[in-house]
Image (cartoon, rainbow, N blue to C red):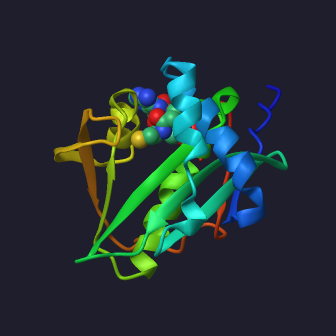
Amino acid sequence: MAERPEAPAVSIRPAVAAELARLRALAAASKGYWGYEAELVASWAAGLDPFARPGWAVFAAECGGLLSGWMALAAPRDGTCVLEQLWVDPALIRGSGVGSALYRYACTRALLLGATCLECESDPNAIGFYERMGAKTSGERRSEWGRMLPVMRLALAPPARDPAAPGEHRRDRDGRR
Ligand SMILES: CC(C)(COP(=O)(O)OP(=O)(O)OC[C@H]1O[C@@H](n2cnc3c(N)ncnc32)[C@H](O)[C@@H]1OP(=O)(O)O)[C@@H](O)C(=O)NCCC(=O)NCCS
């Protein structure tokens, strides 16, 4: 039987401030995926500046050599790291593993920073993703758009065995890693 081609590997690296315009555009396209009003999304994205936020580390995901997603992780407070931003190129949503690669990388970074929990506010449409990642709803919080959003919380545990190469995540079309 012919072998299925693998989806391109996702690699993760620190993002740099010179990429801010691309990160904003990607965030706007990604949030817009859920059908929110375009003007509202555009004005929200124009105000995003993750590099200006104290304690935030910003990471970019590349898939097939293209910027495909990004996330921002805040430094831990009281043992909890907050995943402040997580955006995937709409063309790659639910297919290339970019979101899960970024989320797992956030877990690894948070552990390295000494955190025992990873937390984030979830868009209502993304709850299933965070649950798939193992997180559970731990409450709700008012968002910058005035909506009550679920807070998704994951207890972090060090990996039981050596992980694959850092920042490298690969899976085939059936989602096997
Ligand atoms: C939420 C988001 C980051 C997920 O990224 P993604 O690249 O699509 O996720 P993956 O393909 O890595 O999915 C990992 C698993 O979660 C599942 N999943 C992904 N999105 C899901 C959703 N919205 N509901 C339920 N399950 C979901 C996938 O099917 C996959 O399951 P599998 O391991 O059984 O195959 C992406 O959909 C996105 O950027 N959405 C728009 C912006 C957004 O909502 N960002 C989050 C703000 S809180």
Q: Position of residue 169 (x, y in %)?
A: 64, 55
The residue nearer to you, when weighing 4 against 98, is 98
- The reply to whether residue 174 is in sight is no
- Classify the position of the N terminus by image quarter: top right
Residue 111 falls left or right of residue 13 = left
Residue displayed at 82% across by 45% down: 64
Q: Position of residue 87 (x, y in %)?
A: 56, 43
Q: Quadrant of residue 79?
A: bottom left
Q: Position of residue 88 (x, y in %)?
A: 60, 39
- The reply to whether residue 147 is in sight is yes
Residue displayed at 60% across by 43% down: 46
Q: Quadrant of residue 174?
A: top right
Q: Quadrant of residue 143?
A: top left
Count of all numbered marks drawn on residues in the image: 0
Q: Position of residue 76 (x, y in %)?
A: 34, 75
Residue 158 falls left or right of residue 62 = left
The answer to whether residue 28 is above or below residue 38 is: below
Residue displayed at 70% across by 55% down: 20
The answer to whether residue 131 is above or below residue 101 is: above
The residue nearer to you, when weighing 67 against 103, is 67
Residue displayed at 26% across by 54% down: 153
The residue nearer to you, when weighing 145 against 158, is 145
